[in-house]
Image: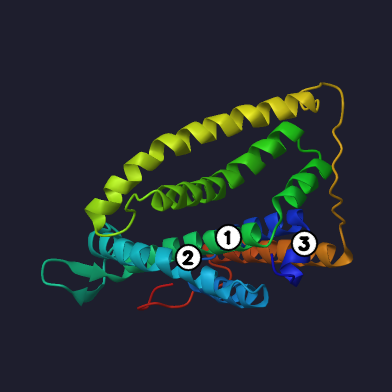
């Protein structure tokens, strides 16, 4: 994991950042604030040395979802009153398109912030930080196991693929060949996963994980720094300001939304 200011940040501060950015995007009247947050996340990914995988997952998710939602909401939303594009078989409306854009940027803000958090946070530090704030150890272990299940499965599939390939099994080629090669993978992957789960459970029992009335300790020390306090205070204040502004905008006291086609 590359060293960066984001990697050194306390995991709880990152979680607060995810919630604040996502909820601020939801509260804002239109998609412009979420679009700004996405740009900030790209800059953050650059400083964290994660720009290429971050851009890959954001574009890979954002482009198809944007096209799908623009087609569904833009063409068939009951909110549409103003036509911006005539496709012949359907008319794309302004209101539905703006609503689709709001959904897309909200999803991408949550996705981008969560991805950067998981990529720049050692899971052991996350569990230790959750234990520090009073989260039960079983809940922390559940979170750790849930976040690790996909990477573990990917590593296991890679090892099994390499083993089968070294024994002469063809794992490449067209889609049909790959599908035939994938089916023999399922048995070893499932069986090894069940074995790992049983061994992990036995290991936890021998280490007293289920003992009641005892607070488990951790080898990992997670320090809350002054920078974490500053970041948490600023990001929380940002959310409160956005929420207050959105409420005032909804009451007609302070206009916040950009004017789109004569409407906010």
Residue appearing at x 46%, y 39% in the figure = 189
Q: What residue would you read off at disc 3?
A: 232
Spot occupied by residue 161 in the image (x, y as percentages of width and height): 43, 50
Q: What residue would you read off at disc 1?
A: 115
Taking 256 as reference, is 124 above or below it?
above
Mark 2 and 1 residues: CB-CB less than 8 Å, in contact? yes
Camera-side residue of 172 and 11: 172
Direction from residue 245 to residue 218 in the image, left or right: right
* Secondary structure beneath label 1: helix
Taking 143 as reference, is 138 above or below it?
above
* Secondary structure beneath label 3: helix
Spot occupied by residue 108 in the image (x, y as percentages of width and height): 49, 63
Taking 146 as reference, is 7 above or below it?
below
Q: What residue would you read off at disc 2?
A: 57
Q: In which quarter of the view is residue 262 placed?
A: bottom left
Residue appearing at x 74%, y 48% in the figure = 124
Q: CA distance from mark 3 to mark 2?
A: 26 Å
**Of pointers 2 and 1, the one earlier in the residue sequence:** 2
- Whether residue 256 is visible, yes or no, is no
Camera-side residue of 93 and 54: 54
Spot occupied by residue 17 in the image (x, y as percentages of width and height): 68, 60
Camera-nearest label, 3 or 1: 1
Camera-side residue of 119 and 194: 194
């Amino acid at each position: 994991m590359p060293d960066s200011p984001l990697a050194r940040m306390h995991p709880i501060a990152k979680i607060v950042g995810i919630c604040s950015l996502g909820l601020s995007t939801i509260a804002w009247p239109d998609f412009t604030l979420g679009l700004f947050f996405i740009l900030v996340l790209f800059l953050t990914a650059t400083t964290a040395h994660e720009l290429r995988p971050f851009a890959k997952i954001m574009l890979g998710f954002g482009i198809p979802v944007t096209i799908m939602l623009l087609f569904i909401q833009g063409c068939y939303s009951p909110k549409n009153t103003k036509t911006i594009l005539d496709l012949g078989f359907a008319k794309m409306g302004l209101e539905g398109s703006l609503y689709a854009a709001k959904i897309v940027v909200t999803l991408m803000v949550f996705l981008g912030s969560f991805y950067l958090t998981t990529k720049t946070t050692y899971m052991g530090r996350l569990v230790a930080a959750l234990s520090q704030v009073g989260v039960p150890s079983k809940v922390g272990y559940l979170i750790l196991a849930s976040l690790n299940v996909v990477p573990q499965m990917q590593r296991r599939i890679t090892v099994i693929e390499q083993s089968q390939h070294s024994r002469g099994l063809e794992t490449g080629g067209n889609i049909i060949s790959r599908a035939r090669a994938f089916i023999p993978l399922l048995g070893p992957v499932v069986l090894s996963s069940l074995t790992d789960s049983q061994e992990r459970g036995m290991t936890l029992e021998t280490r007293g994980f289920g003992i009641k009335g005892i607070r488990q300790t951790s080898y990992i020390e997670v320090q809350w720094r002054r920078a974490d306090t500053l970041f948490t205070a600023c990001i929380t204040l940002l959310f409160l300001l956005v929420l207050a502004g959105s409420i005032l905008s909804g009451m007609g006291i302070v206009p916040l939304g950009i004017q789109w086609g004569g409407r906010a």
